Amino acid sequence: MVTNLDVTLRDGGYRNNFGFTLEYALEHARESVAAGMEWVEIGYRKGSFQPKPGLGLTGLGADEYIRAMAEVIPPERICMILHPKNIEDDDLTQMFEAGVRLVRFCLPSTTPEPGLAVLRKAANLGFTTTVNITRVSQLDRRRLVELSAMSEDAGADVIYLADSNGSLLPDEVSRLVTLVRSVTRSAIGLHAHNNLGLALANSIAAVDAGATWIDSSVLGMGKGPGNLITEQWLAYLGRAGRTDRYDLGRILTLAHRMESEIAEARPSLPLPDLVLGHFDLSVEERAKLPVDHMGAAFSAARELTSPVVAA
């Protein structure tokens, strides 16, 4: 059984500075839940990795927004993600009281201990919890094992492998899921990005290897070239006979509305993002690529991944 999580309002926010209207956000969540999606990630709590002024509704995740969301969908469907460094001591309690029931932690691989302490608090408060291990394609396998074990010990219900650079191949996803399953009893999830057009193939590989949580976004709306496309994923699940519990027609209607009303939601594969995926580079390296000449961008990306030769 796969648990599906809609990340459109959060990851899609990278396309429009998290500037969804409240009316649209509420309608999106309502329709997503009505179509059968188990969880809707309604936004960040207090900003993404680097908080900045001017973030829209789903980048701030204020209490009044959560309460409005809890009036249209059950709290047992409301998810929020956060970077532990961005929140205060009382944020988790406020989030729970406002209506969030699933909280996700972006866990830095170099200094995970502060984040794990916040995770323990969330678990004690009664949240369902996930740890998102970001840029997993660049992470040493031994360190991945350590982080997975530490996350389970701190109370993580789900350990997500986040292909932040969109560079993983299906066989690599299978090996990573198998590895993490061998060292933890927590459920395993995949957060796929689509730089190489492999988000669907990678999600299939993850589930075949034992992952049971999958992120997706309507129209694939997400950072860079976007995420696993919800409507493709649900169509696959039905076509493959894995489940018939989702209303694909309802999701397609929602996708049509998004495409009509939100220009930034329209599917796109910017060529620089394909280059980043090819070289397993993060989106932060995009600014170093000359986007007006793709041959030069390809060469620049190759230079970024070349080993430095000592003088």
Image: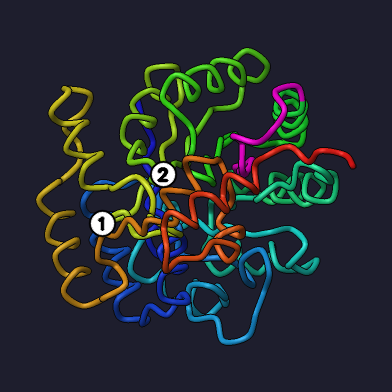
Residue 157 appears in the figure? no
Graded by Cα atoms within 10 Å as few (under 14), some (14 to 19) or many (20 or more), the crowding at tag 1 reads many
Tell me the CA gap for discs 1 and 2. 13 Å
Q: Secondary structure at mark 1?
A: helix
Residue 279 left/right relative to 144:
left
Extreme residue toward the right, this view: 311
Colouring scheme applied when the structure was drawn: rainbow
Residue at image point 69% right, 33% down: 139
Q: Whole-percent x and y of residue 58?
A: 48, 73
Q: Is residue 240 above or below residue 244?
A: above
- Please check the rendered image and state whether residue 295 is part of the magenta-colored stretch, yes or no: no
**Residue 234 is drawn in which quadrant?**
top left
Mark 1: amino acid? Leu
Q: Whole-percent x and y of residue 107?
A: 70, 46
Graded by Cα atoms within 10 Å as few (under 14), some (14 to 19) or many (20 or more), the crowding at tag 2 reads many
Residue at image point 38% right, 41% down: 196
Looking at the rendering, in which quadrant would you find the N terminus?
top left
Residue placed under numbered mark 1 in the picture: 219
User: Which mark's residue is nearer the viewer, 1 or 2?
Assistant: 1
Extreme residue toward the top, this view: 182
Q: Is residue 244 above or below residue 219?
A: above
- Please check the rendered image and state whether residue 131 is part of the magenta-colored stretch, yes or no: yes
Residue 143 left/right relative to 27:
right
Identify the disc placed on residue 215: 2
The magenta-colored residue range is 130-142
Residue at image point 74% right, 58% down: 84
Looking at the rendering, in which quadrant would you find the C terminus?
top right
